[in-house]
Image (cartoon, coloured by chain):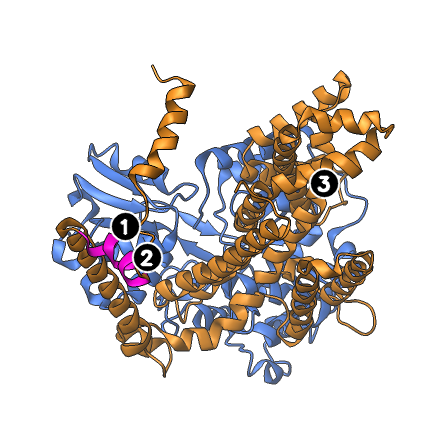
Amino acid sequence: MTTATDIAEAQLKRPAERRPDSGRGLLHRTFKPLIGTPVNAAVTLACLWVLWLGIKGTYGWLIARAVTEGGPEACKVGQGACWPFFEAKLRFMIFGVYPYEEHWRVLLVMVLFLGAIGITMIPRFWTKGLLYLWGSVIIATAVLISGGVFGLRHVPTTQWSGLPLSFLLSAVGLALGFPLGVVLALARASQLPAIRVLAVIFIEVIRGVPLISILFMASVMLPLFMPSGITVDKLLRAQIAIVIFAAAYIAEAVRGGLQAIPRGQYEAANAMGLHYWQAMRLIVLPQALKVSIPPLVNISIGFFQDTTLVTIIGLLDFLTTVRTAMQDPAWVGIAVMEGYIFAAVVYLVLSYGMGAYSRFLERRLRLGYD
Amino acid sequence: MTQSKPFVRWLAMSLIVGTAALSAAPASAQSTLETVKKRGKILCGVAPVSPGFSFADDKGARKGFDVDVCRAVSAAIFGDSEKVEYVPLNTNVRFQAVQSGEVDILSRQNTWSFSRDTSLGLDFGPVVFYDGQGLMVPTKLNVKSASELADAAICLLPGTTTLQNLEDYFRPKNIKYEAVVFENSDEWRNAFFSGRCDAITSDRSDLASVRAIANDPDQYVVLPETISKEPLAPTVRQGDTNWRDIVSWTVYALIAAEEKGITQANVDAHLKSEDPEIQRLLGASGDFGKMLGLDNNWSYNAIKAVGNYSELFERNLGPKTRLGLSRGPNTLWTEGGLLYSPPFR
């Protein structure tokens, strides 16, 4: 049986057994693990070969054999990537069925949003001014996308689609789900049994049901309970479902953070005479949320990708508009690879961006176990 | 053409049937026509994407056969075919959307069947497209009939009735087969082209378009058997006969226009026609529009906007498109087809 002492000893011994070659040069340190032994060398060679095949194949498909001119017929005959497809469909894949002449409005919203996110990311700007910035960005977004005022043409929500819709669903879902989730997490950790039980029931029920079912309920059941003639916008229904779902998951991530805070912190806050909300706001939550950053980012990335599920209730998210572009009778069956690869690259870039920001944030907040 | 989980579909169905039974005939204070006129546009439920029937062009504008039906109705009511808001609907929510008033017309390749007509609180307009489930095989298999498909792997999409039709057809004949279900039409098509499936089954219009997409269409052949009847018809809420009349007679006007040789291009010339039925149809004489609660030039506007039935077909589905469908049973009764408009008198 391994005892704690054994483990401790083993950990003490290990560095001694496997001391890095600290005295040698960089070249030596880099190449020794790669070609130090015959087996290592063989594995390295095999990996290089696979890598080479991958690069060669990608280059051949994407550039050397690519079809750069002509229409669907040229791509049908050609063996490589079909660039004319992107030429014809790029705007549709990104903006979907939003009126063509009004695309600039959505583009402007995305630029505003990215700008605001960029500013928010820089810790120097973390002041009250940010709230005003976001307030005005949100109002501008609503005005620009929906229209109907200032001479802008009204665009019904059935035409909101593509990447902006995916952004909207996940951004609003997380922005509203976050405060709700924090409240739920506090309720679940509460001393009051009634509140705790309610929070537990809410969280477990929502987490126990797949998102797809909640979306489906929101889209199919809700209208049947409404008086006839009254319809709640389909997008709004889906958005509410996503907010509720996000809140339940965020609550659990935050609860994990709350549990990581030592009892002493709570007691110290009490001893200072802070009441519950003060203690939470000033002492506990700042530490708990810091610990929760990795799971929260995990949830954000997951939700951004989960928004593709809204396709089941007929909303045209980014993946759906890409697939719609591929199904245009002129192109159907021709640009299948191109469409899916494009979607994958866009999702990869955006998800990687979120991950990179979270790592920056962790470093910045000196969170870590080193 | 559906892509949904059986459970989800079952849930949707039971919900719809349940509520339809509970709320028997939803008493609407206002007629659909009044609501539509007040709103200034029609809400038209369409498939999110279905090549030829409902799809988006490079600029995101909706096009297709089903879309043109709604455009025709819009032209008949408003004199403008663009007063339509398209609501993309999947198979699992489409009928509920009609019941709850989310859409005024559902024009998305719905098969008209007994149970849907009687128990879902829906009414069906005239059949706009006669389809039926068929089977397609590679030519090199040398199969001439569906009864030679014993032990074949048959690939299909999880359609509402696709698998059941297959079962209904093969079980009495005691033919064993292996059904392979694909969730996604791209995968399904590629599985067939790459030889994973001995045969694929779907509606014949769908098979024809799959064949048109193939690198060499001559390598594939659609078998002669039609194993199910799929009359596709626009769908409206039950209980508003005037609205149903408007949708039905707009479609009939397009069929009658083909019969009378009226096209988008020559409809103006036909306004001066001597033929009394053409006069009544186009509103040159009589008060037919008023009887529907519309202007008398309602059908003139519809034909002017989208053309007659044959123009709709040729533009969206016909041999000149990549789908390359032949009219099949969708020709006029005078040419041995099934399209028949009741008389305008």
Frontmost residue, B248 versus A58: A58
| On-image quarter of the C terminus of chain B | bottom right
- Residue A25: x, y in percent? 31, 61
Secondary structure under the numbered disc 2 in the rendered image = helix
Magenta-colored stretch includes residue A35: yes
Magenta part of the protein: which range? Answer: A26-36
- The residue sitting at 25% across, 44% down in the picture is B154
CA distance for labels 1 and 2 = 8 Å
In the image, residue A76 sits, relative to residue A122, either above or below, namely below
Q: Would residue B273 be visible to someone looking at this image?
A: no
Chain A's colour? orange
| Residue for badge 2 | B207
Are dots 1 and 2 on a single chain?
yes
Question: Label for residue B200?
Answer: 1
Question: Does the residue at mark 1 contact the one at mark 2 (Cβ under 8 Å)?
Answer: yes
- Inspect the image, locate mark 3, and give the three-letter code of the amino acid beneath it: Pro
Dividing the picture into quadrants, the one containing residue A290 is top right
In the image, residue B237 sits, relative to residue B268, either above or below, namely above
| Residue for badge 3 | A286
* Residue at the front extreme, as displayed: A23
Secondary structure under the numbered disc 3 in the rendered image = helix
- Residue B141: x, y in percent? 13, 53
Q: Is residue A330 left or right of residue B119?
A: left
Secondary structure under the numbered disc 1 in the rendered image = strand
Q: Which chain is blue?
A: B
